[in-house]
Image: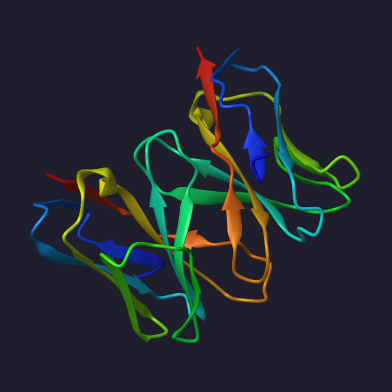
């Protein structure tokens, strides 16, 4: 496997459910990110992990809980979401300090019903 | 003022045309600049970095104007496959990339 892989590709969940999004990168990068993309809005940075330490948390509600067990894996745990949380959730990785930009995963399209 | 601003478009151009997009940014301390391409319902993919001296990659030319705080993307000889949304990205700190809302391009046969 190469690049950044995200699972699942699609997820429909009720407001009382608990689910997790998974991201894995095979690029040897040392930073990983969660972004949210809603219709007609720019990508919103949610969390940044560098060397498995969270370095940025952009005022994200506590119903979103990230976890980075090692430099290759990143999770986003979801619980008691709201319909307005429906969006495309993108994981990305990069080599912090290098100027190569991000590599994104293909995203999880989340629908909260 | 938004941190990164782009004209949302759409820009409808015929095949073979030249088209240019601009993007303005508000943080004069921004260091790195990129153009990403995003196809419908797909993830963004890096198109090119933007360097101070300007840079070219085939039919694509990117330029940076620090004094006026904008970057541009020029596409020559447009192809149908160039139809996509083009996202301007500006860094703010080591980890933080700020994305514009994107400019939609439709190349018409």
**Residue B9 seen anywhere in this rendered image of the structure:** yes
Residue B11 picture location, percent across and down:
58, 18
Q: Position of residue B61 (x, y in %)?
A: 75, 39
Q: Is residue A106 visible?
A: no
Kindly identify the residue that appears in the image at 91 percent across and 44 percent down.
B67
Question: Looking at this view, is A25 or A60 the one in front?
Answer: A60
Residue B95 in which image quadrant: bottom right
Query: Which residue is depicted at the point 21% across and 50% down?
Result: A82
Indicate left or right for A65 with B34 as reference: left
Whether B80 is drawn above or below A16: the answer is above
At horizontal 59% and vertical 64% (from top left) the residue drawn is B96
- In this view of the protein, which residue sits in the foreground, A69 or B48? A69
Left/right of residue B94 with respect to residue A20 in the rendered view: right
What is the x, y in percent for residue B15? 59, 16
Judged left or right of residue B86, residue A46 is left
Vertical comparison of A25 with B82: above or below: below
């Amino acid at each position: 496997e190469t690049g950044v892989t995200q699972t699942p590709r699609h997820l429909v969940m009720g407001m009382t459910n608990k689910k997790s999004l998974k991201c894995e990168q095979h690029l040897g990068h040392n930073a990983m990110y969660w972004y949210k993309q809603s219709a007609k809005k720019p990508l919103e940075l949610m969390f940044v992990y560098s060397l498995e330490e969270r370095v940025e948390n952009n005022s994200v509600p506590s119903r979103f809980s990230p976890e980075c067990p090692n430099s290759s894996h990143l999770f986003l745990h979801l619980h008691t979401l709201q319909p307005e949380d429906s969006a495309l959730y993108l994981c990305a990785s990069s080599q912090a300090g290098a100027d190569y930009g991000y590599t994104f995963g293909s995203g999880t399209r989340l629908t909260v019903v | 003022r938004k941190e990164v601003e782009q004209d949302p478009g759409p820009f409808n151009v015929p095949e073979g045309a030249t088209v240019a997009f601009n993007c303005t940014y508000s943080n004069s301390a921004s260091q790195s600049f990129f153009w990403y391409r995003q196809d419908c319902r797909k993830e963004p993919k890096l198109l090119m970095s933007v360097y101070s001296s300007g840079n070219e990659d085939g039919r694509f030319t990117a330029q940076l104007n620090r004094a006026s705080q904008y970057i541009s993307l020029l596409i020559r000889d447009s192809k149908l496959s160039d139809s996509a949304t083009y996202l301007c990205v500006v860094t703010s700190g080591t980890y933080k990339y700020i994305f514009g809302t994107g400019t939609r391009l439709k190349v018409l046969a």
